[in-house]
Image (spheres, rainbow, N blue to C red):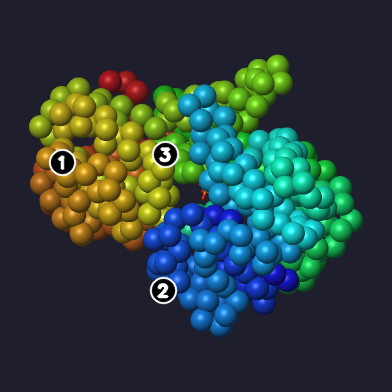
Amino acid sequence: MRIAVFGTGYVGLVTGACLADVGHQVMCVDVDAAKIEGLQRGVIPIYEPGLEAIVRRNHDEGRLAFTTDAARAVAFGELQFIAVGTPPDEDGSADLQYVLAVARTIGRHMDAYKIVVDKSTVPVGTAERVGEAIARELATRDVSIDFDVCSNPEFLKEGAAIEDFTKSARIVVGTDSERVRAAMRECYGPYSRNHDKILFMDVRAAELTKYAANAMLATKISFMNEIANLAERLGADVEQVRLGIGSDPRIGYHFIYPGCGYGGSCFPKDVQALARTAREVGYEAELLDAVESVNHRQKRVLFDKLVQVFDGDLAGRTIALWGLAFKPDTDDMREAPSRVLMEALWAAGARVRAFDPQAMAETARIYGVREDLELVPERYDAVDGADALVICTEWKPFRAADFARLRTLLARPVVVDGRNLYDPRILREAGLMYYAVGRGESLAAR
Ligand code: UDX
């Protein structure tokens, strides 16, 4: 099949590269000329394990092209994927200007039947708006060309996007057209061979499925964070509780890890957008609002613990941070809990000395050069002489830390763990004061 993909961000690039990898002819379009020029030379603008190799291979073998020429891409693709960003508006709703701009571009240039595929995360009803935008352009041109719009949400996790695309649990397609169903079967057939993974449904159901999935996962996390906060105050170890409830298959082990709050480009944005959509149709989504506010508070727990440990006296202290990215295997800092912590520490007059395996360049880009932020290339260098070590992201190399070395390097033996990586008993034996989320030394009585 010939496929055009608008947007070479995270979702567009993974989609384009993976579809080319099974033999489709793919043309990726972006308005950012520098990005396209880089991609043509094999430079990937994001860090995602495995992506670079797939992009290079398919580009070299002639199945994956990059262009800024939208007219060419519209003419090229039977399928037109829209995978541009939907950043949150000030009021929390999704900003559709980029999606609708692509729709107008398609309407302006198409000269034969097209299937337009909404891949971006968009509010319920967007497929209709995309269709209207295309129809308006066609009317302006005074031509009558048939087209269909379908919804095909993505469920990619950063850091595991290739695996999620190629071995997805399900492929959701919202459409009422038999022609679209046949085309999407052809498009995704190579990824749906072992058993039929394609779930056809109504357009609106597909659009809502994406939000419902992310909101459900975010709910599990906020719920668990609430239990962790409670466990801490009750003197129970939340990690034992986690295993205790996860063993029930109705609950399951996934997404019940307590921590310092969920971040990233999806959960915070999508929970807020769904709550906003609810409000628009006259429904108060109380649970969604609570999921969001629990998360907001959770992003403050690391700072609050430091305030308690140091009796509010943080000015002039050096705090070491392990992990800056919102989760491991990415350099993405969007909505990262580390940012809430660093900004609170700076406001309190403390210095931050941080290490992250991938996200230091992005951190430097966001915060620029500042006196109270030092980014160091080695994790133990961050700890040397620091008043406390705080873990914000559970990168694999952090899991087996040298506690004796930490004890020697730290000026004060304080470890605050936002990801519950360690066994509290072992740290206590190593002479470290260990404060985690819902476990470790108690701060409740202080
Ligand atoms: C998520 C969804 O998983 C994916 O299906 C969707 O397409 C996009 O949003 P992503 O944002 O890449 O993917 O990250 P994910 O691995 O889901 O983690 C999101 C956040 O939740 C991270 O900040 C992570 O640290 C946090 N998290 C996750 C927890 O705090 N506890 C958990 O048990 C799981």
Q: Which residue is mark 1?
A: 370
Q: Which quadrant of the rendered structure holds the N terminus?
A: bottom right
Task: Give x and y (percent) for residue 282.
Answer: 70, 16
Quadrant of res 21: bottom right
Query: Which residue: 79% across, 58% down?
Result: 113
Q: Which residue is mark 2?
A: 41
Crowd around label 1: few <14 · some 14–19 · many ≥20 (10 Å):
few
Instruction: Say whether disc 1 or disc 3 marks the residue closer to the N-terminus.
Output: 3
Q: Nearer the viewer, residue 408 or 369?
A: 369
Task: Give x and y (percent) for residue 292.
Answer: 52, 28
247 w.r.t. 34: above or below: above
The amino acid type of the residue labelled 3 equals Glu
Query: Which residue: 49% across, 43% down?
Result: 265
Q: Is mark 3 within 8 Å of ligand 1?
A: yes
Q: Which quadrant of the rendered structure holds the C terminus?
A: top left
Can the viewer see residue 317 in this picture? yes
Instruction: Say whether disc 1 or disc 2 marks the residue closer to the N-terminus.
Output: 2
